[in-house]
Amino acid sequence: MQNIHFPVNFEFKTSSLANDFTATDSSGKAIAYVRQKMFKLKEDISVYDNETKSKINYKIKADKWLDFSTAYSFSNDKGLEFGKVVRKGWKSIWNVHYQIIDQHQKQQYVINEENPWVKVLDSLLGEIPILNFFTGYFFNPTYLVKDMQGKTIVKLKKLKSFLGKSFEVSKVGELDTDDDDRVMLALMMFVLLERRRG
């Protein structure tokens, strides 16, 4: 996924029982097809080159059993690990807090909500029968990827859509080319985890 043309859209398949989505770039070209294996106690995600699923480019795997601070490691098609995203325990209950770690086990970026109240209202509405089908049209959280100086590099926004199935990733700052894959995979894993929570 090097040299990504932003914005990138994540579109979930509502017709599938699996938690799958396609990532397309600004030209509408598919840059990845993300498939989560169902009924697994540990997360196991395959990232294919497109919807044909002919080639797996990356794997994302949880490093331990389900836990508040689980790390999800990224490996390429040769099995080489080159980073991970870590969900930080209790901070995530109110304000989402994830860390993106590089291949040297050093933190590079954090993912936080722009406004935590939006997600709270979105989650509350999701608990109301019938209205929960339309939550994707009311409250749409935005998440920020920031570097270690606190500068926003990338934004992930939940778009207005039925059942909240569409997200847009836009670049707002400078992102090193070697970090493209790591940041994009971190956001893919992030969306799979946070989408369930509103």
Image (cartoon, rainbow, N blue to C red):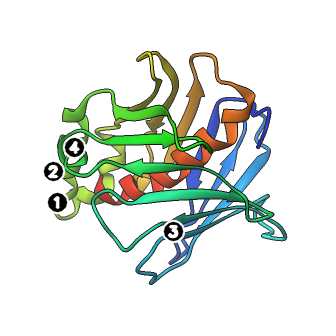
- Mark earlier in primary sequence (2, 3): 3
Amino acid type of the residue that numbered disc 1 sits on in the rendered structure: Glu
Query: What residue do we see at 76% from left, 41% from top?
Result: 28
Identify residue type, mark 4. Answer: Lys
Q: Nearer the viewer, residue 79 or 39?
A: 79
Q: Position of residue 24 (x, y in %)?
A: 70, 45
Residue corresponding to mark 3: 19
Which secondary structure, mark 2? helix
Residue at screen point 61% across, 56% down: 74
Residue 26, quarter of the rendered image? top right
| Percent coordinates x, y for residue 64 in the rendering | 41, 70
**Which is closer to the viewer, label 3 or label 1?**
3
Q: Residue at x 15, y 59 (%)?
A: 128
Q: Secondary structure at mark 3?
A: loop
Which residue position is annotated with label 2? 124
The image position of residue 158, as x and y in percent, is 43, 40
On screen, residue 47 versus residue 56, left or right, reads left
The residues tagged by marks 1 and 2 sit, at their Cα atoms, a distance apart of 5 Å
Residue 67 higher or lower than 25, as above or below: below
Furthest-front residue in this view: 104
Task: Name which of mark 3 and mark 4 comes first in the sequence.
Answer: 3
Question: Which residue occupies the foreground of this view, 145 or 89?
Answer: 89
Category of crowding for the residue at label 2, using alpha-carbon neighbours closer than 10 angstroms: few (below 14), some (14–19), many (at least 20): few
Circles 3 and 1: CB atoms closer than 8 Å: no
Which amino acid type corresponds to the residue marked 2 in the rendered image? Leu
Residue labelled with disc 1: 127
| Cβ atoms under marks 3 and 4 closer than 8 Å | no
What residue did someone put label 4 on? 91
